[in-house]
Amino acid sequence: MSGVPRQSEDLPWQRPEDAVTPNPPQAPGSPRLVDPEDDLPSAGYAGDFETTAIPSYSSADPAGNPSNSGYNLLHEPEPLPYVQPGGVHPGGRHAAPDDWDAHHEERVRAAGRRGTQDLGLLILRVALGGLLIAHGLQNLFGWWGGSGLSGLKNSLSDAGYQHADILTYVAAGGQITAGLLLVLGLFTPLAAAGVLAYLINGMLAAVSADSGRFGFFLPDGHEYQLTLIALAVAIILVGPGRYGLDAGRGWSRRPFIGSFLALLLGIGGGIAMWVLLNGANPLA
């Protein structure tokens, strides 16, 4: 018969449709994962749940019957595998899904190798927080030669602050609370913003007490206060690091928009406290 392939004399007889194709069609290159949204929609796009398809890879015999090649079992086109643009792995070879996962895990591990960065952030937090705690205890209990609550109240009244009796406890308690939060690395952006507001307010008071003269170098300048302000700003922008109670939060790993908001809160809070509680022009 002209339409039926000839059986070999050394092989048992079998039906033509069961014959094994000598060179079955090969599937396309190994799939690689990319964003499905990169695929172009078909002409009859039916929404986000449409399945993109390509024509079958199976061949047909001269009579029009599809061969049993494994790619057209249900006489339907095969789904199109998503492929990575470029078609090759960064290493120059085709990337299988396992290769993609391994590459992603390696990038995560590389991002986790921060060297001494977290140790430096811990020292920065503990230094500024410990200084605030010491000053708060000095103002609250008069330790280490401090004037205590009465001396703090008198200094606030002399600087022109209203409600100095309440501000005395707020200032001393706020210093200790913000310092503890910085040392523990807890709610670090808010704690550092509170410290920044306190330092800006204190510098405005010092400039006002010096008749509006802004000097930089000590002993009459404000370089010490500016240094502390720079430390608070740095902590807000870089985050607390991993050695703190905020280690699992986003502002510890990748601070960004929240840090700018905390920075604006600290600057605005310091200026607002001066305007509302003192009201004098520090440069007058």
Image (tube, grey):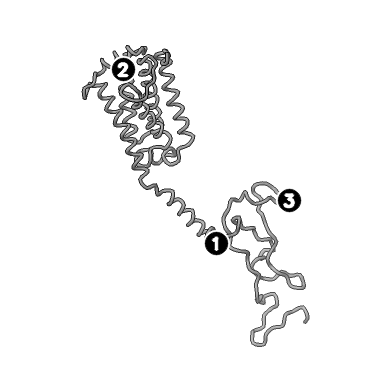
Residue at position x 68%, y 61% in the image = 77
Q: Amino acid at mark 3?
A: Ala
Residue assigned mark 3: 43
Q: Quadrant of the N terminus?
A: bottom right
**Residue 200 x, y percent position in the rendering:** 39, 23
Q: Quadrant of residue 16?
A: bottom right
**Residue 227 x, y percent position in the rendering:** 36, 30
Q: Which label was assigned to residue 168?
A: 2
Disc number lying in front (1 or 3): 1
User: Residue 85 vs residue 161: left or right?
Assistant: right
In the displayed structure, 104 sits above or below 220; it is below
**Residue 198 x, y percent position in the rendering:** 37, 23
In the displayed structure, 107 sits above or below 249; it is below
Kindly report the distance in space between the C-alpha atoms of the residues bearing marks 1 and 3: 34 Å
* Residue extending farthest bottom: 9
Q: In this view of the protein, which residue sits in the foreground, 219 or 71?
A: 219
Q: Which label was assigned to residue 92?
A: 1
- Label 3 near label 2: C-beta < 8 Å? no
Q: Amino acid at mark 1?
A: Gly
Ranked by sequence position, the earlier of labels 1 and 3 is 3
User: Residue 212 vs residue 61: left or right?
Assistant: left
Q: Quadrant of residue 76?
A: bottom right
Q: Secondary structure at mark 2?
A: helix
Kindly report the distance in space between the C-alpha atoms of the residues bearing marks 2 and 3: 73 Å
User: Residue 243 vs residue 44: left or right?
Assistant: left
Q: Quadrant of the C terminus?
A: top left
In the displayed structure, 188 sits above or below 63; it is above
Q: In this view of the protein, which residue sits in the foreground, 198 or 185?
A: 198
Q: How many marks?
A: 3
